[in-house]
Image (cartoon, coloured by chain):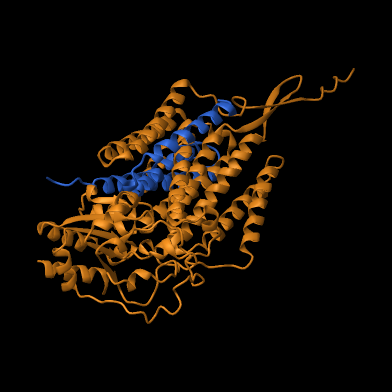
């Protein structure tokens, strides 16, 4: 009796499930649906080119999101739909309640908090894809063929997807921890002053290199320690990157994190081969990048110097700061201010972050209305970095029912100050400092500022003469002959002016 | 779709984003940030894939948590944007 021949050595053939990169083949209607969702998102942003079309744009955004979600649910086998619906319902309730209750002055914090959620969601999706690559269609299998049979054995995640996944998780984690710090700073749970660690630049660069190196290494070794180390280090660097950045630079930080949340979504879109995610990620990424650029330009600072941090602390002290304490200035009362403005032909109101802090926007609008009744032309001038996020002042004024066609951007109104009787500065400081135009030693030299000093009279509301603006610079404007200081809480002062006018 | 097709879509979308965002009026920059926040939560697609799959409880729970987070953002982001946009009014007269 002869023994059966030994089985032939198994022939192993590696290949991916799905197409060349490993994405599951999707029917064309699905691809089209995701494309339509992406186009809806483009139209959502397009609508924001004017206030009239903006609400329609927002509805396009909602439609796009609904298409993306329904399509996804329709094409995947769902183990338990109830769980998913419950998860969506929980999120919807929290989201809607927050959106309804939030004060407009707290919008920067809210946006930072929302960014952190996108970041964390990206990390969770990345981790889920790592744990269950088959569901995401990024698994690589080996086909083991013997004489009798063949079986497919999971050998891991295909290398291209590992890079995309690694990048997505890293950007997501940075977005999350960075946004949490930005939130704490904006919400006042953490000092707005920059916290400077020694050797932080070397440390951050080292960490960044390490993360990129690990993502590269991840393509050759997909052990879980590599994945989780990438995640942990990215959380850490997000924290370290934002901690040294001061309160005044928050508009840039918030925009930058906005951009990151977009790139994280795009990286995940690559992993899933999903057009809606890729289009959205690219849109949001560019949007945040452009806003960061606009904010940097408005402060005459380079992006690198903002990221390096440290600005807006005690260290900054420019020309004119020393010995300025005893300089003479004119002080006025609410009655003086009311009289001057009621006699004026045109008043330009310059609001800043201080107006938001004092919640003075409603009283301010009342003052504007009374002045208009007296036949005074009232306009508002907004510096791009007034407030803690791009467009912050515009929203607050809109909330107080100031029509948007009375509100002007810096470049559109700056030439008008020379033809204006009264410039009324409320809660703004550095953005009106003439030293930015003349004093080369000033830390804010070169920053575009509002030419308020060209108005016949400048009324400047400030709590007290002590304390400089966020850049730590004294404002030469206070001591000018045509400036009258109104020293009081912004809201109280405006309310008193309203009383005198009425 | 192969990598190059996906990359092409990505690069073209970056260009579209560039032109569309520059066209946004500065007065609406805050709503812009809120709405980009909402739409970047399209990452919920990935979360749903993870949450729908059977057999991997760890991945499923991570997916469900991501669905909750992304939903907060989607509903909160669109709602707060709508609330802000409704406040922008033209001069009466």
Left or right of residue A169: residue A361: left
Left or right of residue A327: residue A204: right
Q: Position of residue B41 (x, y in %)?
A: 43, 42
Q: Quadrant of the N terminus of chain B?
A: top right
Left or right of residue A491: residue A289: right
Given residues A421 and A52, the one toward you in this image is: A421
Left or right of residue A9: residue A484: left
Q: Position of residue A455 (x, y in %)?
A: 26, 61
Instruction: Name the quadrant containing residue A379.
Output: bottom left
Q: Quick one: which residue is furthest to the right in this view?
A: A1
Given residues A74 and A345, the one toward you in this image is: A345
Given residues B43 and A257, the one toward you in this image is: A257
What residue is drawn where x is 55% and y is 45%?
B58
| Vertical placement of residue A490 versus A277, above or below | below
Q: Quick one: which residue is furthest to the bottom in this view?
A: A326
**Chain B rendering hue:** blue
Provide the letter of the chain coloured orange: A
What residue is drawn where x is 10% and y is 59%?
A374
């Amino acid at each position: 009796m002869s023994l059966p021949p030994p089985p032939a050595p198994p022939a192993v053939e590696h290949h991916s499930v799905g197409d060349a990169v490993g994405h599951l083949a999707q029917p064309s209607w699905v691809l089209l649906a995701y494309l339509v969702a992406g186009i809806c998102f483009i139209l959502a942003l397009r609508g924001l080119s004017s206030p009239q079309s903006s609400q329609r744009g927002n509805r396009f955004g909602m439609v796009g999101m609904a298409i993306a979600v329904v399509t996804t649910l329709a094409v995947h086998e769902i183990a338990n739909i109830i769980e998913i619906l419950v998860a969506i319902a929980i999120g919807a309730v929290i989201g809607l309640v927050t959106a309804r209750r939030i004060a407009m002055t707290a919008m920067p914090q809210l946006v930072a908090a929302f960014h952190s959620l996108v970041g964390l969601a990206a990390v969770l999706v990345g981790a889920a894809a790592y744990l269950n690559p088959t569901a995401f269609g990024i698994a690589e299998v080996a086909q083991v063929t013997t004489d009798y049979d063949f079986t497919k054995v999971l050998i891991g995640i295909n290398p291209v997807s590992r890079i995309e996944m690694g990048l997505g998780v890293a950007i997501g984690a940075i977005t999350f921890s960075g946004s949490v710090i930005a939130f704490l700073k904006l919400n006042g749970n953490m000092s707005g002053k920059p916290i400077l660690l020694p050797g932080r630049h070397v440390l951050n660069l080292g960490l960044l290199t390490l993360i990129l190196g690990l993502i590269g290494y991840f393509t050759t070794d997909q052990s879980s320690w590599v994945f989780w180390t990438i995640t942990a280090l990215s959380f850490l660097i997000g924290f370290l990157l934002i901690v040294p950045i001061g309160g005044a630079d928050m508009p840039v930080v918030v925009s930058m994190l906005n951009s990151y949340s977009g790139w994280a979504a795009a990286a995940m879109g690559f992993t899933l081969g999903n057009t809606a995610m890729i289009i959205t990620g690219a849109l949001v990424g560019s949007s945040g990048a452009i806003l960061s650029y606009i904010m940097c330009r408005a402060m005459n600072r380079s992006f690198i110097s903002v990221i390096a941090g440290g600005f807006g602390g005690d260290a900054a002290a420019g020309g004119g700061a020393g010995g300025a304490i005893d300089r003479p200035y004119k002080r006025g009362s609410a009655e003086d201010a009311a009289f001057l403005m009621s006699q004026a032909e045109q008043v330009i109101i310059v609001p800043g972050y201080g107006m938001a802090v004092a919640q003075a926007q409603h009283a301010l609008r009342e003052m504007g209305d009374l002045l208009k009744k007296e036949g005074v032309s009232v306009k508002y001038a907004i510096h791009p970095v007034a407030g803690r996020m791009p467009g912050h002042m515009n929203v607050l004024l809109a909330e107080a029912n100031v029509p948007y066609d009375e509100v002007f951007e810096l470049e559109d109104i700056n030439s008008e100050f020379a033809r204006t009787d009264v410039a009324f500065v409320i809660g703004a400081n550095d953005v009106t400092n003439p030293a930015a135009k003349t004093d080369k030693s000033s830390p804010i030299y070169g920053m575009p500022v509002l030419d308020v000093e060209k108005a016949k009279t400048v009324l400047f509301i400030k709590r007290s003469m002590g304390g400089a603006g966020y850049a730590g610079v004294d404002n030469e404007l206070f001591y000018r002959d045509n400036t009258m200081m109104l020293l009081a809480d912004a809201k109280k002062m405006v309310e008193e002016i309203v009383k005198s006018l009425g | 779709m192969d990598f190059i097709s996906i990359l092409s879509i990505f690069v073209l979308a970056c260009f579209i984003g560039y032109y569309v965002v520059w066209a946004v009026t500065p007065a609406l920059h805050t709503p812009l940030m809120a709405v980009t926040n909402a739409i970047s939560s399209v990452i919920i697609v990935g979360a749903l894939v993870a949450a729908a799959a059977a057999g991997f409880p760890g991945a499923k729970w991570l997916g469900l948590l991501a669905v909750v987070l992304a939903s907060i953002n989607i509903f909160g982001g669109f709602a707060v944007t709508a609330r802000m946009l409704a406040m922008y009014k033209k001069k009466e007269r």
